[in-house]
Image (cartoon, grey):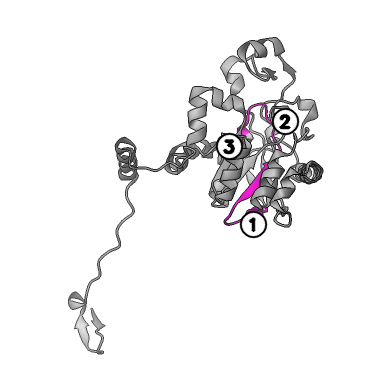
Amino acid sequence: MSVPDEEGRVIPISAAPSFPAADPEPEPLARALAFLRRRITGDYEVDEFGYDAELTDKVLLELIRPLYHHWFRVETVEVKNVPEEGGALVVANHSGTLPVDALMMQVALHDEAGRALRLLGADLVYQLPLLSHLSRKTGHTLACREDADRLLRRGELVGVFPEGFKGVGKPFSERYKLQRFGRGGFVASAIRAGVPILPVAVVGAEEIYPKIGDLPTLARLLGLPYLPITPFFPLLGPLGLVPLPSKWMIEFGEPIRTDEYDPADADDPMLVFNITDHVREVVQQMLNELRLRRGHAFPPFL
């Protein structure tokens, strides 16, 4: 067999020039060993808040991706509304007895929008040593004005759940009914930074731990905002902590602009209240429509 050279002459294939093969993709074991070497030698970066992007992507998110894809079968809607770059404030409903919705939303934005989500967490999260450390490693920080403002001005995607514990701990009978959105501090931060507010609706979390009761006395003794009773917990013990495999949908609404306001307008309580109320109405409407679109919470497995 022969091939033509650059001048059109026919030469044997054995004499044809060869090209170096592309470097093969490192084997999984090699990648794992390289990752461990970087962790041991300290050859990795964390930002001023303690966020470790490599650990988050390669370990922590990897652990919860099976839940995202195979247990809850999360479907995202209108991901195109997520800004490709620059700061934005992600405002979502909160539910599910345990805040699994925050983790699923973090996977959705990381894997499908290519954005890291910097969640603002409640004080309780940072009073628990192990949870506090993991939260900061995955990019979360305390829900306070200073941290929110710094992250937004750095161009980060900042997530907030304005309902707080009132939303995540509400009874099953009040599912998909938004609780009060606090005093609107998140809106003031968005105005000061001049970034859009991205409303998000999460459907599916309400069904993973249907809360049918509470143990307030024991919750106070343990320093918890509530201690839920579900159909399976505490009746089944640790097995009752396994979330039910409800079908999830996460919708990203159209961004609500704030750059038309002056940063000083963040100190206007009436303006902040009106925008907060508007955001709440938008998220509630999205929830109502998305819930109908989702249909039954436990469709047959295919």
Residue 299: x and y in percent read: 69, 38
**Residue under numbered circle 1:** 80
Residue 296: x and y in percent read: 74, 38
Q: Which residue is drawn at the image coordinates 22% and 86% (left, top)?
A: 10
Label 2 packing within 10 angstroms: few (<14), some (14-19), many (20+)? many
Q: Secondary structure at mark 3?
A: helix
Residue 169: x and y in percent read: 71, 25
* 217 on left or right of 129: right
Of residue 30 and residue 257, the one placed in the foreground of this image is: 257
Magenta-highlighted residues:
78-100
Of residue 275 and residue 249, the one placed in the foreground of this image is: 275
- Amino acid beneath label 3: Leu
**Residue under numbered circle 2:** 167
Verify whether residue 26 appears in magenta. no
**Residue under numbered circle 3:** 103
**Labels in figure, total:** 3
- Amino acid beneath label 1: Lys
Q: Does 54 appear above or below 221?
A: below
Cβ atoms under marks 3 and 2 closer than 8 Å: no
Going from N to C along the chain, the mark reached first, 1 or 3, is 1
How far apart, in angstroms, are the residues tagged by discs 1 and 3? 20 Å
* 100 on left or right of 269: left
* 4 on left or right of 176: left
